[in-house]
Image: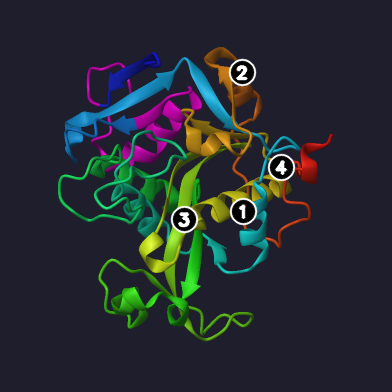
């Protein structure tokens, strides 16, 4: 079923903010998001400036920040295993560019479309369909520099990458992003490689989740989901009221996602205020992480 949305071209004369003057990007984008709009490009048109639109769905997908947040048991184990090093705001531009390189069937916290061969790997092929056009990427990199857009990153030690990722293991793969932790007192001196992440926009006590990705070819299966668990814990600790995933999809439904009407979303957005929140570093995860799936008893008894 097609979801109704209000949309407007992000260009002069549309009645919505003009994205062309770089000096006005931050204030204009923030103004649009505070009125309940978000940016989206036509994935069929490619990275062309004129294809960017402001969109406002009739309902909004919300990931709960209270006890309704659901973490599947398998993901609980993945998170607790400590397989990934998880950071925030260490590689924002790399995260958003990785998200843009993945074909998608929806926006928000949605998974990549499975391409030829059934992989979820990041693709750098020209013509890849994405709603993340170049003007949106540039705008969010500016928003990050102004402290209102943030990323969560998942890393693996280069030495732990699969043998098939030999280029990334040796630091020679152009598409791999490496993090040198040798200067961090509490971290091992080995280089790490970016294998997953997510990013979004902070509006007062509301966080608008934009996109996520993972690198299955680098051993990053479930890396974006682990980042989401860390994001929810971070938002709870900072007193956020709403995690907006924008448009519902099956990928985020597993986390307890629900929808609210546009009018209700706008009221909650207004009540969350506009004061900037000190983002800070991630803290250790609490226990429990969220609501868990009920265990099935042997024999099917109640």
Q: Is residue 15 magenta?
A: yes
Q: Earlier in the sequence, mark 2 or mark 1?
A: 1
Residue displayed at 43% across by 63% down: 195
Q: Is residue 111 visible?
A: yes
Q: Disc 2 on helix, strand or loop?
A: helix
Q: Tell me if residue 234 is in the magenta stretch.
A: no
Whole-percent x, y for residue 78 in the image = 61, 60
Left or right, 293 with respect to 187, comes to right
Residue interval drawn in magenta = 11-39
> Residue lying furthest front in this view?
299
Q: Nearer the viewer, mark 4 or mark 2?
A: 4
Q: CA distance from mark 2 to mark 1?
A: 33 Å
Q: Residue under circle 1?
A: 75
- Image disc number at residue 197: 3
Q: Residue 284 occupies which quadrant of the picture?
A: bottom right
How is the structure coloured here? Answer: rainbow
User: Which mark identifies residue 293?
Assistant: 4
Mark 3 or mark 2, earlier in chain: 3
In terms of image quadrants, where is residue 63?
top right
Q: Secondary structure at mark 4?
A: loop
Q: Nearer the viewer, mark 1 or mark 3?
A: 1
Pointer 2 local density, CA inside 10 Å: few below 14, some 14–19, many at least 20: few
Neighbours of disc 1 within 10 Å: few (<14), some (14-19), many (20+)? some
Is residue 182 toward the left or the right of residue 13 in the image?
right
Mark 3–mark 2 contact, CB under 8 Å? no
Q: How far apart are labels 4 and 2 at the CA level?
A: 32 Å
Above-or-below relation of 53 to 105: above
Q: Secondary structure at mark 3?
A: strand
Q: Which disc number belongs to residue 267?
A: 2
């Amino acid at each position: 079923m097609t979801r109704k949305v209000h949309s407007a071209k992000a260009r002069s004369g549309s009645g919505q903010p003009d994205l062309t003057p770089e000096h006005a990007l931050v204030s204009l984008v923030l103004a649009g998001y505070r009125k309940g709009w978000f940016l989206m490009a036509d994935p069929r048109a490619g990275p062309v400036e004129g294809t960017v639109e402001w969109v406002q769905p009739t309902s909004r997908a919300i990931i709960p920040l209270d006890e309704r947040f659901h973490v599947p048991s398998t993901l609980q184990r993945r998170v607790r295993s400590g397989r990934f090093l998880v950071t925030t705001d260490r590689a924002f531009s790399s995260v958003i560019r990785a998200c843009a390189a993945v074909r998608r069937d929806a926006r928000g916290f949605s998974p990549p479309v499975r391409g030829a061969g059934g992989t979820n790997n990041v693709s750098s092929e020209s013509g890849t369909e994405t709603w993340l056009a170049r003007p949106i990427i540039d705008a969010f990199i500016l928003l990050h520099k102004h402290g209102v857009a943030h990323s969560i990153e998942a890393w693996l030690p280069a030495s732990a990458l699969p043998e098939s990722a030999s280029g990334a293991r040796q630091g020679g793969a152009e598409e791999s992003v490496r993090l040198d932790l040798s200067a961090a007192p509490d971290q091992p001196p080995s280089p790490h490689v970016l294998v997953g992440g997510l990013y979004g926009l902070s509006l007062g006590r509301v966080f608008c989740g934009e996109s996520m990705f993972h690198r299955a070819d680098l051993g990053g299966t479930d890396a974006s989901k682990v980042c989401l668990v860390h994001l929810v814990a971070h938002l709870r600790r900072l007193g956020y009221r709403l995690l907006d995933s924008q448009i519902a999809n099956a990928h985020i439904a597993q986390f307890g996602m629900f929808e609210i009407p546009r009018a209700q979303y706008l009221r909650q957005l207004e009540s969350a205020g506009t004061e900037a929140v000190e983002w800070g570093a991630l803290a250790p995860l609490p226990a429990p992480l969220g609501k868990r799936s009920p265990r099935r008893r042997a024999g099917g008894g109640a």
